[in-house]
Image (cartoon, helix red, strand yellow):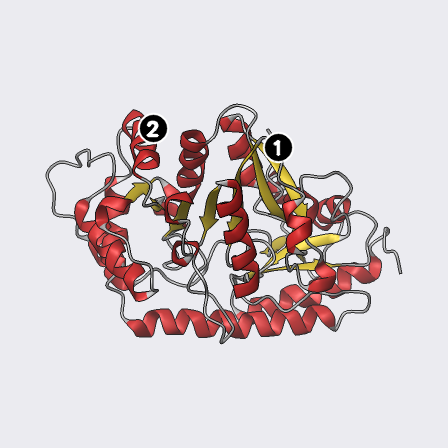
């Protein structure tokens, strides 16, 4: 089981805080924007005498609201095709466990969310990484190269769209290539779309649920964590038109009894947040993205593409080893009692010695703090002992 590249440095951060160092967290996708007030109101005024179990598939009223929500994005599903999960993480895990046998392979474009590997290991499956490069903005390689990744043990393709950690949004051409491979080889397509609202391009986001001819192959992964700043309530969803997959997923849902009641109540209420809330969140992240990209690329020897979605970017830095650099920031660097915490990108690749000079940066803090953090990044690189230029 791999360590989380995002959380494995927490002990060093705690020691730094004990020394009085203030840490600016660029390492984790924890939004700082307030949760919708309609969700907080429900949380603060729960009028129940018993906090009971819900159905294993989640509250019907929540699933009805989710179906209406997906309709706004051109995703046509019924409440019965939605299963509420304990976060998007459980949706990924249950999808793997329901669809894959021991030794089955999942082709995953990398860099990719690190916990996919952990979930695959938990389910006995194997990740086959398909590398993309920072030099072409992490776009997918050619159809022919993609097809070469398919083996006799391949059972699925997994994408995150918009992507964590790169912010890449898959184009219509890329999605068509994926659709063709899924159809040709009768594969499952696991599509993590939790960052759907955060698309900074005029090109429409294409959901895997909108791809024609593979409706029964698609399993959509979703979560309210990011769009409503509700990471802690642990509410996600698994959505599929495949009846057999839903039946098999439900066995695991029944074994864990039910998703969190209070989390479901808050999530359901949050879906009534006014459009002005989501527009404000979008505008804020767009401004943060623009600032961070410009700030990183202004530092000598640094480069990051302009991510088109989510709220992360992968940056290439003039350093010998990102793991060492990220630890050094917490152990040895400070400026005026402050330092930064970033995630080494090596943890987002399955292959060894890939991404060794890359880090993932999350821009989920306000712009004033981001300005301080970018200044600390610049100052730290000027004095890092392992600087390569």
Q: Residue at x 45, y 62 (%)?
A: 206
The local crowd at label 2, few if under 14, some if 14 to 19, many if 20 or more residues have their Cα within 10 Å, is some
Viewer-proximal residue among 188 and 301: 188
| Residue 75: % across, % down | 33, 59
Q: Is residue 44 in view from this perspective?
A: no
Q: Is residue 166 above or below residue 52?
A: below
| Residue 9: % across, % down | 64, 41
Q: Quadrant of residue 23?
A: bottom right
* Labelled disc at residue 221: none
The local crowd at label 1, few if under 14, some if 14 to 19, many if 20 or more residues have their Cα within 10 Å, is few
- The residue indicated by pointer 1 is 2
| Residue 84: % across, % down | 30, 43
Task: Give the SS element for disc 2.
Answer: helix
Q: Is residue 109 in view from this perspective?
A: yes
| Residue 103: % across, % down | 57, 25
Choose mark 2 or mark 1, whichever is in front.
Answer: 2
Q: Quadrant of residue 262?
A: top left
Mark 2 or mark 1: which comes first in sequence?
1
Q: Quadrant of residue 337?
A: bottom right
- The residue indicated by pointer 2 is 252
Viewer-proximal residue among 176 and 64: 176
Q: CA distance from mark 2 to mark 1?
A: 23 Å
Q: Residue at x 22, y 58 (%)?
A: 41
> Image quadrant for the N terminus?
top right
């Amino acid at each position: 089981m791999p360590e989380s590249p995002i959380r494995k440095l927490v002990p060093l951060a705690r020691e730094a805080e004990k020394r009085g160092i203030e840490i600016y967290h660029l390492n984790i996708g924890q939004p700082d924007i307030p949760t919708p007030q309609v969700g907080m109101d429900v949380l603060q005024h729960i009028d129940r005498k018993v906090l009971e179990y819900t159905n294993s598939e989640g509250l019907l009223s929540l699933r009805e609201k989710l179906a209406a929500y997906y309709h706004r994005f051109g995703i046509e599903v019924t409440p019965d095709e939605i299963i509420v999960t304990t976060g998007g993480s459980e949706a990924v895990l249950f999808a793997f466990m329901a669809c894959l046998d021991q030794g089955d392979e999942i082709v995953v474009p990398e860099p990719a969310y690190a916990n996919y590997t952990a979930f695959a290991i938990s389910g006995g499956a194997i990740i086959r990484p398909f590398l993309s490069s920072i030099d072409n903005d992490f776009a997918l390689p050619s159809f022919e190269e993609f097809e070469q990744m398919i083996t006799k043990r391949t059972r699925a393709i997994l994408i995150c769209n918009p992507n964590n950690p790169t912010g890449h949004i898959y184009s219509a051409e890329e999605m068509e290539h994926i659709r063709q491979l899924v159809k040709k080889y009768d594969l499952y397509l696991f599509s993590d779309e939790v960052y759907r609202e955060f698309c900074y391009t005029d090109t429409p986001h294409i959901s895997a649920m909108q791809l024609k001819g593979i409706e029964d192959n698609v399993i959509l992964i979703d979560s309210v964590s990011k769009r409503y700043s509700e990471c802690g309530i642990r509410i996600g969803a698994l959505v599929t038109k495949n009846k057999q997959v839903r039946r098999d997923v439900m066995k695991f849902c029944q074994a864990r009894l039910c998703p969190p009641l209070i989390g479901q109540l808050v999530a359901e209420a949050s879906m009534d947040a006014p459009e002005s809330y989501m527009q404000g969140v979008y505008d804020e992240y767009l401004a943060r993205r623009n600032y961070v990209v410009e700030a990183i690329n202004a530092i000598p020897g640094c480069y990051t593409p302009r991510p088109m979605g989510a709220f992360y970017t992968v940056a290439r830095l003039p350093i010998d080893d990102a793991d060492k650099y990220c630890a050094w920031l917490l152990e040895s660097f400070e400026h005026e009692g402050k330092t930064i915490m970033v995630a080494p990108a090596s943890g987002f690749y399955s292959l060894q010695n890939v991404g060794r000079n890359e880090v993932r940066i999350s821009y989920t803090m306000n712009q004033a703090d981001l300005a301080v953090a970018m200044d600390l990044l610049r100052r730290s690189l000027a004095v890092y002992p392992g600087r390569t230029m």
